Image: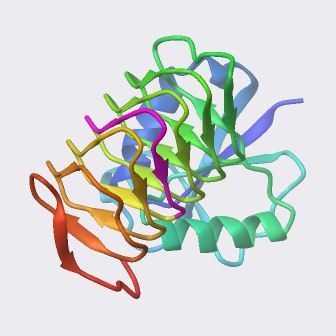
Amino acid sequence: MCNNLILVGGGPFARQLLEWLTDAPIQRDAVIKGYLNAGVVDSRLSAELVCLGDARDYLPDKNDLFVCALLEPREKLAVCGEIRERGGRFQNFNLCDSDIPRRIVIGEGCLLAPKTGWASDICLKEFVTIQPFAGIGHDVTIGAGATIGTHCVIGGYSFIGAGAVLQPNVVVLPHVRIGEFSRIGAGSVVVRDIAPQTMVWGVPAKKVAGPIEAI
């Protein structure tokens, strides 16, 4: 039976995700049904794809299969969590051009964008988003809802906390622990542990704000 693929979110990232999914082999057993509104809507996406309603009150059908098109951690954990509580099923989407090593644990609703690089013994919790050209080292754990930006490099044995955001071109040295819901500014080099709910930036990365109530 064919699944109805539904994007959760209608912003610019959803439009990019639609392009990736259109070319992905997974589309052989799924049809893109539409998207659910969860805030800002990209006008070009709405011209290509039908809006099925609001993500916070949509009632899933038994053939619906959801993919998270949200990037802000608190938003995607809340919205996708509500859909799952109503019986919605989220699919992992591995859109990488190369094979993923076997010793990787991938939680529900994760999105691995094209042109990412992977080592072995990696654990991704639920609703993690990895943007293109990111490189993930061996023995890395990435917490639920985290977003890893384009061209980020995460060294081996590092831990990225739940809800953390690494903006583009961040480098995390090996054995570093980044606290939950922290935000690492673009181009930063993280050389030491980062406390939870802290914003850092620079080379080396230094605290610029925290604690952060909402990011």
3 versus 120 height, above or below: below
Q: Is 183 or 206 nearer to us in this picture?
A: 206
Using residue 125 as the reference point, say whether residue 15 is left or right of it: left
What residue is at 29 percent from the left and 55 percent from the top?
Answer: 192
Q: Is residue 188 above or below residue 113?
A: below
- Whether the magenta-drawn stretch holds residue 208 is answered as no
Q: Is residue 153 magenta?
A: yes
Q: Which residues are magenta?
A: 151-162
Rendering coords of residue 70 (x, y %): 48, 59
The percent position of residue 139, horizontal first and vertical second, equals 55, 33
Q: Quadrant of residue 82?
A: bottom right
Residue 31: x and y in percent read: 68, 34
Viewer-side residue, 40 vs 135? 135
Q: How many numbered discs?
A: 0
Q: Residue at x 57, y 21 (%)?
A: 120
Residue 20: quarter of image: top left
Q: In this picture, is 161 found above or below 86?
A: above
For the residue pair 46 and 130, the one nearer the viewer reads as 130
Looking at the image, residue 69 sits to the left or right of residue 56; the answer is left
Which quadrant holds the N terminus? top right
